[in-house]
Amino acid sequence: LATPLPSERLEEVAIQSLQAALGKLELGTAELPSVGSMGHALGRCKPCAFLYKDGCQAAIDCHFCHICEDGEKKRRKREHRAAKRAVVVAGMSEGMATQALLQPGDHYAPL
């Protein structure tokens, strides 16, 4: 039986595999529309905020991903805020946590 690779090594192998595959892709095609799209397959890209709004002026030289779907930047931002809120809530008492989770306009009626 082969010993499993540590997670850091697995990530390194995945990156090398991606780089090898990307070497075969041509920049400016649907598979690799911008420089920033290189990390998309590994989830290591940052969505371009301009692509779906006014269009990205940088085109293939853009350091942001042009493969991500419209709304991806906003979705990731919401997910990040929720994760931060969960960390804060984890350190609070139950009552404090309930209050912290309530959004403005929410109403809480204890049972």
Image (tube, grey):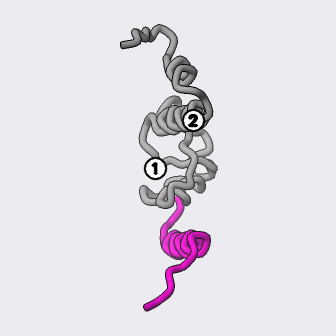
Q: Secondary structure at mark 2?
A: helix
* Camera-side residue of 83 and 77: 83
How many discs mark residues in the rendered view?
A: 2
Res 107 seen here: yes
At 46% from the left edge and 46% from the top edge, which residue is drawn? 68
Res 55 seen here: no
The prevailing secondary structure element of the residues shown in magenta is helix
Crowdedness near tag 1: few (<14), some (14–19) or many (≥20) residues, C-alpha within 10 Å: many
Magenta part of the chain: 1-27
Q: Amino acid at mark 2?
A: Ala
Q: Judge whether 11 appears above or below 38 on screen.
A: below
Q: Is residue 107 left or right of residue 8?
A: left
Whether the magenta-drawn stretch holds residue 67 is answered as no
Q: Residue furthest left?
A: 111
* Camera-side residue of 80 and 59: 80
Image quarter hosting the C terminus: top left
At 54% from the left edge and 43% from the top edge, which residue is drawn? 47
Which residue is disc 2 drawn over?
90
Q: Secondary structure at mark 1?
A: loop
* Camera-side residue of 69 and 91: 91
Residue 87 percent coordinates (x, y): 59, 37
Which residue is disc 1 drawn over?
67
* Camera-side residue of 11 and 35: 11
